[in-house]
Every structure is written in C-alpha cells, then in structure tokens.
Image (tube, rainbow, N blue to C red):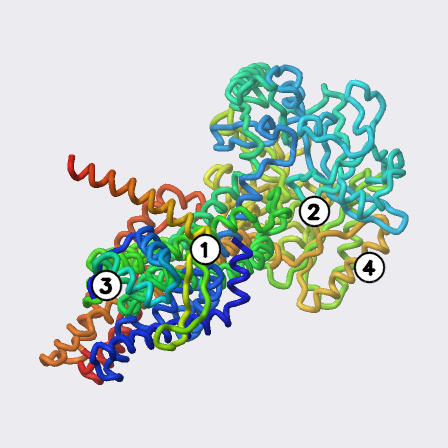
C-alpha cells in the first residue's frame, strides 16, 4: 500500500499530463462522432465538453481514486487553508487565543492543583498518619497544641496507634568556625520518622527512648542541608554540630524524597523528655502525630482518644477541664487551608474552559455557516463530498495545530509563574515538584480539538447530506442552528458573570485587607532577630545588660528615631499564650481561666513600631529589675478581662505564676498580630528590663538609609558578642505585604481568569452578532427601503440581541449567588457576595455586551444603506 | 443525460465485460457499455476514468497509447490475466445475487 502511494506520488507529474491527454482525446473522439452525426464542428466540440461535465472535475475524481494523490491534494488543502486563515486574521487569532487559553491555562492550574492536592504525601502509607490536637470546644478552638504531660499520657495509654510522636520547631544558633548562623530545626521525639514511615538514607537515626539515660543530643539532617552545607560526605556521620553551645552528634541523613511541611527546617534534633513529674500540664507546645494500626479506623481511634481525654480531665481538672482530643488525618491538616483556594481556582479554570469551548464552537459555526453557500456551490459544481469535508478538516486541523502549540507554550510558561505566586511560607508539599502534567495537557488539547472538529464539520455534513438545493436556499443554517448559537451566547454570558463576581469578591477582600488598621505604623521600620542563649546569658541580668548595650549602639546611628525589642513580633508567626490572673477578680466561670498572649518588650518598643498608647503610660527605663513590677495590656484584654473595661490600677500577673503581682500602668491599642483578617486578641505586656526576652526581635524606626541602620545593628552585635547570629532582617512593610500575599495571589489569578472570560465573551457575542446580522441583510435592507431611520434600526437590532445577554446575566447572577453561598465562602472567608458587587459585575458585562452588539449592528446597517440591495 | 445510479461493483463488472471482447479507449468503453446494456447505462468520463484508473492500479487492466479508428491518439485499455479472473468471479457473484433477488421478488 505504501509503495503504491509512493509510486503514485513519484510519477505524479507524468500521470497528470497523461490524464490531460486522455480526457482531451475523449473530447476529440466525441467531437468527431457529433460531427459525423451532422453537427457543426464548434457546436460539436461544445457539446462534447459539456457532456464530459467539466474537465477539472473529472481530473479531480480520478485523483481521488489514487492513494498518493490524496497526499498531494491534502497539501493543496493545507496551503489553501493557510491562505484562508491569513485572509481572516480576526477569526484566526480569536480561534487560536481561545484554544490557547482554554487548554493552556487550564492545564497550568490543574497541574499545580494535581501536584499539591491530589498527589499522595511523600510518606509511607500516608493515609494512616494522623495529627492529634487538644480540643477546646468551649473556646471554639479544635486544634490546639498539646502539653507535654498530656502527650506522654496519651502515648502510654492508647492502643489504636502503632506509634505517636511529638514535634516542635525552634530556632538554634549553629556555631561554625567561620561564624554563627541561625537555623530552624524540628525537635522530634525519637519515633518521629517511624510514624511518618520514612527510612533514613544513611545512619542509624535516633537512639530508642528507653535506651537513653544520660543527656542525649543527636541530629538527623535533611538531604538538602547535608548536601549544601556539609558537602554530602558520608564521613560526617558521628561527627557533631555545635548547636546553642552544645554539641549534637549527627546520627543520620534523610532521603532526598523526604519533604517536610515547614520548608525551612534544615535538620531534626531529638526531643527527649525527662523528669516527667516536674512538667507543667498547663503549658501547651507540642504538635502530635501518630500512625494508625492497620485494622483501626479513624473513628475508632477518636473514640479511644475521647475516653483517654475524659480520664485525664477527671484526674487533672485544674489543667484539663473542658479539654478533649481531636484526631485529624494529616492530609487534611496540611491541605485544609489552601484546598478551598485551589479548588476555587480549579472551578474558575473549568469555567474558562467551558466558555472557551462554547466560543470556539460558536466561532466555527458562524464561519462555516457563512461559507455554507460557497460549500454548496462547490458541491453543486461537482466537488466530491469527501473533498469538501477533507478541506474543512484541514482548515480546522490547522487552527487546532497552531492553537495547540500556543496552548502548550502557555502551559509551560504559566506553571513557574503560578508557582512563584504562592508565598514561600505557605506549607504546600509538592509545590516545588509541580510541573506541567502531560496527561492533563493532552486531555485538554484533545477536548478542544474534538470540539473544534465536531462544530467545524457539522455544517458540511448537513450541507452535504441534505442535498444541494436545500443548502443553496437562503439561510441554510435553519432555526435549530440559530437556537443553538443563542444558547451558547447565553451560557457564555452567565459563566462570565460568575467569574467576574469571583474577581469582584477577591478585589473586595483585598481592598478590605488594605484598609485594615494594623495597629502599627510599618513605614520606615526595620526588624531583625537575635537569640541570646548559652552559658553567658543563663542569668537575666546578663541578657538585660547585653541587649541594652546593643540597643543603645543602634540608637546612636544617624537617622534612627526609635529602637526597641520584643519577644513576639506582629505578623511574624511568633506567639505565646498564657493565663492572666487579676488580683481580687475571679473569672466569671472558674473552669474558664482568663487567657492573654504574652509579650516582653523594651521601653522603646511601642514608639519604634508605632503602637498607640490609649491610657496611662508606657514602660520607661526606670521600670527595671528591682523597681516595682509593672505591666500593660491591650484594649482587647482590658475590655474582656477587667471589671468595666478599666485595667489601669489593677494588679495582675501571668496565670499560674508564683511571681509578684504587676501593676497595670497603661493600655495600648490593639494590633493585628495574627494576620490582617484576624481580630485582635487579649495581650499582656511585661517590661524586658524586669523579665528579659532571650529571643530578641529588634525594631528600628529610621528616617535615614535602612542599610545604614542595619549596618549599625550588625556592627553593634559583633562588638557585643560575635557568636550571636543576626537573622530575619526585614522591613515591617514586608511583613504586612506578606500577610496579604494569599489574597493578592488569588486576586491576580481570579482577575486574569475574569479578564479572559470577559474577552472571550465579547469576542463570542460580537462574532455571533455579526453573523446573525449577515443572515438578515435582506430584511434589514427592506426595512431601510421602507423608511426606517438608520439609528433606530441599529438600536432595534442590537436590542434584540441584548435579550440573550439579559437572560445570561440573570442566570449568571443566580449561579454566582448559589456558588458563593455553598462553596466560595471557603475560598474567601472575609467577604460575601453582595448586591453592589453583583450589580457592578452585571453592569460591566451589559455595557461591554451592548458595545459588542451595537458596533457590528451599526457597521452592518451602514454598509447596507450605502450599497443598497444591489447584490440581492 | 439519463441518470441511473450504478453500484460501484456493477460499473467494474460492466467495464470488465466491455473489455473482454478486446482493447478499447475510454469513449469506446462508454459506447460498448451502452450497446451491451441496450442503452440502459450511460457512463460519462466523470465516473469512467476514475474507475479505469482504479482498476488499472488494482492490476486488472493494462493501458497503452495508440491510434484510434479515425487516426486520433487515444489510450487503449485491455484486460490482464487477473482482470479476466476478476471478471469470472464478479460474473458468478452477480449471477448469484440477481438470482437471489429475482427469487425474492417472485416470492
């Protein structure tokens, strides 16, 4: 078969000539016959040619009979197709853009969602891993961290799990020969990696807890840290790292495939809990994970944990009253917050794909319908139906190929861009590995192409099969075809309303965040962090002396207006919560002790960060060790915890503290410590000069060059103690912006989708309008002749089409409302779909659709009134 | 021109039959078919030439250029051995079908 094709292809020129001669010879012979039967020679010739039915048509049919010639004519069709596409740049660009956006953008977003949401966690049998939280239903807190004694009791008593482990994260100073550096580490109880189902790449790992007698310090490194910082040599096993002045033996390295939700964690240290009896059950700090036994269900484990928690509540009512245990699959913990956003984006992309498909179909329908007469004429003069179909196939195939290539390019460009939009501190396992998913890309491409072929070829089939005369009649499209196109338009408008509403909501959420009063004045503020630990700073006065000297050095730098330090910096993720006891004022419900987040700040802190004093006075240099203990609270604490909201003058202290009462000397304004969209909670402030913070966040307000201030801080610290590392140098503005990143990313993405949808819809409405009008040339012409005025005719025609748009707007508004009630609230918690948003969306769409209708209508009516009805 | 739809197999059979009595050019084939079917079938170049080329490709016919009866150059087709075998098979096949259909119509 192939050889035959090849032979035909090679011999083509000779055979073409041959075929010409053969047909000419037929005509000659026939002419001779006619002459013999008495016709005049030229009459005879004409009759012979007529009878042959068109020499080119005969040649075409013969060519069709040959295999190789099929290839030749396909090449011809392709060239013809390219020429047509170049002649209609508007249609071509539109079709290609539709394909690229529909298939390309969809693939990019879906690839990321797939990698992050749908892929399994990189642990052994991840579905059996759970997180266990402390549950406080009365405080509306179902995922609290766990106290050490509770964890130990859970672990000793529970049967449902193969293993249970605890982890906390902290910052340590790594002392190297060439200087100090701050690292984030995970402190984990020794069975941690067994619970995750991860086997170390090299090394024995942590010793088993029951074998540990003496103080034990060991480290297990992540593969990345081992490669980057220690050269990746096996010989590092058994050597030690100097961490916070203590040496920790390297006991193993994790495999390269290991991924940890807190991306910055460089290594893990063993958390060995000794002196169980002296631990505080009221101090919560541990994250707990566990591995279910194969035969135990999540519900069974929850039931057992409920029983254990109830027992502990009865044994330790003071610390555990009202506290339960909450077993949650690890996957849900890791994905809970972003899943809604990702699924929302996925829905947006699905809508764009639908709009794109409807649009592509509409474009092709309109175009093929516009060519229906041309095709009918070709069929009438004898072109084979197969030929016409093949030519349409070639044209649509060309669009498909070019659009497909654009889609592939877009997908590969968009994935890295989308990845960079996700903030680095959002714990998304799998994001780093996300790449264009080839299966999905193929699926989208095939879907769009099939859609194109079906709608591109349908009219040709209909034209070909319903017979020539039917197709030649005016308006061969038929009522059904018109209905279908109108439905597509309505659906597009409706989907656009949904997407635009989504973008509108994202915009409102973002604007709401920007308008939030953070309680601090971030401009011109620089923050940095240093940890004062080790033997030298074991006693509070040493820390106070060192930090004060450092702050003084910074204050002397040019341009510095204020400088202070705090134990917990707003919006940085640092936090610490304690009870709050007030002298002589019992909490209304003894089982619900008062709580307030605790901070230790230096006298200059409030001024440096720009917090407002509402009442009383702030700390001064006189509030130091040895003077009367003083404290401040924020407005939220004053209102919630103090009688009549009046805090100043009362005496209070951290709950459970054996220390002295502190006089409340002032109230500061609330700060959005936990995020821009999180209401302020009660806070208690203590003087750093009376109770120093080992972890010091220095805050500098400067009117000069920030670099200069940072340099001064760096020099000051080096002069003080070169073994302390300076870390996390950031502007306060950065912290505030970072807090807006998720909303901003969502806004950017949703706006892109909405803009795409809007563009597609305008294109679709405009193109279809132009087509529908071209079908009505005659009628419009008649009405002009009968004296209709041009402007009123234009308005009338455009208004008819607006009925479709109006139906679409109504349906879309309803759909958007339903979606926002049932789904979107998970994506954007802070805002709801309201009438003004919906109204402005509908307004924009209606305006744009009116233009898309009005302009073609005006053009059409003007053309007709100019050229008259000549052609009809 | 009278238009009778020819089944593709029928056209092939008629061409094979027409050529079984000796080589003919295209117009000759057309005239011979009209003659042997008593004018029931008239085959124009639009269907004849594609069929001739297809059958030549299948190896049933061979062709060469020659002189016509009134000294015009024309391409003459003749049956090859496989072509004769094809004629026999198709003729048998056709007889079977026509008998079957005639029987069916009588029943």
Q: Say which of A160 and A314 sits in front.
A: A160
Q: Say which of B1 and A441 sits in front.
A: B1
Discs 1 and 4 carry the same chain letter: no
Instruction: Give the residue at mark 3.
Output: A468
Q: Is residue A547 visible?
A: yes
Query: Which percent across, then down, holds residue A603?
Result: 68, 52
**What residue sits 42% from the left and 70% below the top?**
A19
Alpha-carbon span between mark 2 and mark 3? 100 Å
Discs 1 and 2 carry the same chain letter: no
Alpha-carbon span between mark 3 and mark 1? 40 Å
Disc 1 element: loop
Mark number, residue A715: 4
Q: Relative to residue A352, is residue A550 drawn left or right?
A: right
Q: Of circles 1 and 2, which is in front?
A: 1
Give the position of the C terminus of chain A as an image quadrant: bottom left
Res. A526 image quadrant: bottom right
Alpha-carbon span between mark 1 and mark 2? 120 Å
Question: Neighbour class for label 2 at 10 Å: few (<14), some, many (≥20)?
Answer: many
**Residue A664 sits above or below residue A716 on the image:** above
Cβ atoms under marks 4 and 3 closer than 8 Å: no
Q: Of circles 2 and 3, which is in front?
A: 3
Read off the chain for label 1.
B
Point out the tag, 2 or 3, that comes first from the N-terminus.
3
**Residue B97 sits above or below residue A588 on the image:** below
**What residue sits 12% from the left and 81% below the top?**
A785
Mark number, residue B80: 1
Instruction: Give the residue at mark 2.
Output: A623
Disc 2 element: loop
Query: Which percent across, then down, holds residue A437?
Result: 56, 48
Query: Which percent across, then down, holds residue A89?
Result: 42, 73
Read off the chain for label 2.
A
């Amino acid at each position: 078969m192939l050889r035959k094709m090849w032979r035909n292809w090679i011999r083509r020129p000779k055979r073409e000539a041959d075929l010409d001669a053969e047909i000419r010879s037929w005509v000659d012979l026939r002419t001779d016959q006619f002459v013999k039967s008495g016709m005049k020679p030229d009459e005879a010739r004409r009759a012979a040619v007529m009878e042959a039915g068109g020499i080119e048509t005969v040649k075409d049919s013969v060519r069709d009979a040959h295999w190789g010639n099929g290839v030749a004519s396909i090449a011809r069709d392709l060239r013809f197709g390219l020429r047509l596409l170049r002649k209609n740049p508007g249609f071509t660009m539109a079709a290609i853009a539709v394909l690229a956006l529909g298939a390309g953008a969809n693939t990019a977003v879906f690839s990321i969602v797939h990698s992050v949401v749908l892929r399994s966690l990189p642990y052994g049998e991840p579905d059996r891993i759970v997180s266990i939280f402390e549950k406080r239903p009365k405080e509306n807190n179902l995922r609290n961290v766990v106290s050490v004694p509770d964890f130990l009791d859970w672990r000793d008593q529970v049967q449902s799990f193969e293993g249970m482990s605890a982890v906390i994260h902290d910052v340590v100073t790594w002392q190297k020969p060439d200087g100090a550096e701050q690292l984030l580490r995970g402190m984990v109880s020794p069975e941690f990696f067994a619970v995750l189902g991860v086997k170390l790449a090299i090394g024995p790992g942590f010793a088993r807890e029951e074998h540990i007698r003496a103080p034990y310090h060991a480290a297990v490194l992540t593969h990345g840290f081992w490669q980057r910082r220690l050269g990746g040599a096996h010989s590092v096993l058994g050597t030690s790292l100097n961490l916070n002045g203590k040496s920790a033996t390297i006991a193993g390295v994790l495999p390269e495939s290991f991924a940890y939700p807190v991306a910055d964690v460089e290594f893990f240290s063993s958390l060995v809990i000794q002196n169980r009896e002296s631990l505080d059950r009221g101090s919560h700090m541990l994250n707990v994970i566990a591995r279910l036994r194969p035969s135990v269900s999540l519900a069974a484990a929850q039931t057992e944990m409920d029983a254990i928690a109830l027992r502990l509540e009865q044994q330790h009512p003071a610390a555990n009253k009202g506290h339960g245990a909450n077993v949650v699959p690890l996957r849900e913990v890791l994905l809970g917050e972003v899943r809604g956003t990702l699924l929302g984006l996925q829905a947006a992309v699905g809508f764009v794909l639908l709009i794109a498909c409807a649009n592509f179909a509409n474009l092709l329908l309109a175009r093929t319908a516009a060519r229906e007469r041309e095709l009918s004429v070709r069929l009438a003069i004898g072109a084979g139906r197969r030929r016409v179909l093949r030519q349409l196939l070639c044209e649509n195939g060309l669009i498909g190929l070019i659009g497909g290539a654009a889609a592939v390019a877009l997908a590969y460009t968009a994935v890295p861009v989308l990845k960079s939009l996700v903030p680095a501190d959002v714990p998304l396992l799998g994001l780093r590995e996300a790449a264009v998913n080839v299966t999905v890309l193929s699926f989208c491409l095939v879907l769009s192409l099939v859609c194109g072929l079906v709608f591109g070829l349908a009219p040709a089939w209909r034209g070909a099969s319903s017979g020539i005369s039917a197709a030649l009649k005016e308006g061969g499209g038929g009522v059904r075809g018109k209905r279908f196109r109108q439905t597509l338009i309505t659906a597009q408008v409706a989907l656009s309303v949904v997407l635009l509403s989504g973008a509108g909501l994202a915009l409102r959420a973002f604007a709401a965040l920007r308008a939030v009063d953070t309680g601090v004045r971030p401009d011109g503020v620089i923050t940095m962090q240093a940890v004062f630990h080790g033997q030298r700073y074991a006693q509070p006065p040493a820390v106070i002396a060192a930090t004060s000297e450092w702050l003084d050095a910074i204050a002397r730098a040019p341009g510095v207006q204020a400088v202070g330090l705090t134990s917990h910096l707003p919006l940085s993720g640092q936090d610490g919560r304690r009870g709050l006891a007030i002298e002589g004022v019992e909490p209304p419900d003894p089982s619900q002790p008062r709580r307030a987040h605790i901070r230790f700040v230096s006298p200059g802190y409030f001024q440096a960060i720009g917090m407002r004093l509402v009442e009383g006075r702030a700390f001064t240099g006189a509030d130091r060790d040895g003077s009367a203990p003083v404290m401040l609270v924020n407005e939220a604490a004053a209102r919630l915890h103090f009688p009549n909201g009046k805090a100043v003058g009362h005496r209070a202290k951290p709950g459970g503290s054996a220390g002295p009462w502190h006089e409340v000397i002032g109230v500061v304004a609330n700060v959005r410590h936990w995020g821009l969209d999180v209401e302020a909670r009660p806070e208690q402030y203590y003087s750093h000069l009376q109770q120093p913070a080992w972890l010091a966040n220095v805050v500098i307000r400067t009117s000069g060059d920030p670099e200069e201030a940072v340099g001064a801080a760096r020099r000051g610290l080096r002069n003080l103690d070169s073994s302390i590392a300076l870390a996390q140098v950031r502007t306060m503005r950065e912290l505030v912006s970072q807090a807006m990143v998720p909303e901003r990313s969502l806004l950017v993405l949703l706006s892109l989708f909405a803009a795409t949808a809007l563009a597609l819809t305008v294109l679709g409405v405009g193109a279809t309008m132009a087509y529908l009008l071209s079908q009505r040339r005659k009628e419009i012409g008649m009405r002009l002749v009968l004296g209709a005025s041009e402007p009123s005719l234009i308005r009338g025609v455009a208004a008819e089409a607006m009925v479709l748009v109006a139906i679409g707007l109504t349906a879309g508004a309803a759909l958007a409302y339903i979606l926002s009630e049932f789904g979107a609230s998970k994506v954007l918690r802070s805002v709801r779909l309201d009438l003004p948003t919906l109204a402005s969306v509908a307004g924009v769409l209606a305006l744009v659709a009116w233009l898309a209708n009005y302009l073609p209508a005006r053009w059409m009516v003007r053309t007709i009134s100019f050229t008259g009805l000549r052609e009809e | 021109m009278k238009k009778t739809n020819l089944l593709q197999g029928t056209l092939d059979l008629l061409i094979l039959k027409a050529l079984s009595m000796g080589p003919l050019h295209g117009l000759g084939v057309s005239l011979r078919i009209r003659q042997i079917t008593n004018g029931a079938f008239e085959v124009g170049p639009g269907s004849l030439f594609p069929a001739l080329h297809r059958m030549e490709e299948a190896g049933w016919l061979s062709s060469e250029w020659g002189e016509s009866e009134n000294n015009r150059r024309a391409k003459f087709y003749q049956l090859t051995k496989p072509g004769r075998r094809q004629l026999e098979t198709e003729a048998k096949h056709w007889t079977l079908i026509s008998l079957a259909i005639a029987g069916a119509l009588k029943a």
